[in-house]
Amino acid sequence: MYGDDIVKKCGRLPLSLKILRSAFYGKSSDEEWEKILNNEIWSFDKEDEILPALKLGFYDLLPHLKQMFTYCRLFPKDYMFDKDELVLLWMAKGFLCESNGNKSMESSGQEFWKS
């Protein structure tokens, strides 16, 4: 019902759709989907369909993920990230915590790249 309208707002761009899929996976109520569809973010930048999807996805992130994502703003535009280096920087800043299991901080950081 709402999905087709959201796809149109994304300009059918795969990146926008993937961002929204990840951010809103599990939302099933009509109210949640209507809130996404009618969010004022869609009207901010008519030229770029990716930015509204990024903003909507960012607002729905867990706090620790927002912190890690926001840290990346320190780098210049078009900077090519080395994922291993970025994971080490996240570790140095304390964004990654050791789990109670056998998973290392490096493994936890690498998992963020896969999702």
Image: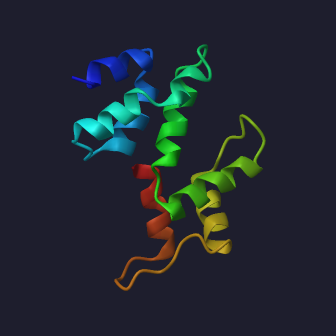
Residue at figure coordinates x 47%, y 80% from the top left: 98
Left or right of 29 on screen, residue 78: right
Left or right of 60 on screen, residue 21: left
Residue at figure coordinates x 62%, y 20% from the top left: 45
Vertical placement of residue 30 versus 67, above or below: above
Front residue of this view, candidates 58 and 87: 58
Residue at figure coordinates x 50%, y 74% from the top left: 105
Vertical placement of residue 29 versus 63, above or below: above
Vertical placement of residue 15 versus 74, above or below: above
Vertical placement of residue 114 versus 93, above or below: above
Outermost bottom residue: 100
Residue at figure coordinates x 61%, y 23% from the top left: 44
**Residue 39 at x, y percent in the picture:** 47, 31
Front residue of this view, candidates 19 and 3: 3
Q: Is residue 113 visible?
A: yes
Q: Quadrant of the N terminus?
A: top left
**Residue 65 at x, y percent in the picture:** 52, 58
Left or right of 51 on screen, residue 39: left
Quadrant housing residue 48: top right
Quadrant housing residue 66: bottom right
Quadrant housing residue 79: top right
Front residue of this view, candidates 15 and 30: 30
The colour scheme applied to this rendered structure is rainbow
**Residue 84 at x, y percent in the picture:** 58, 59
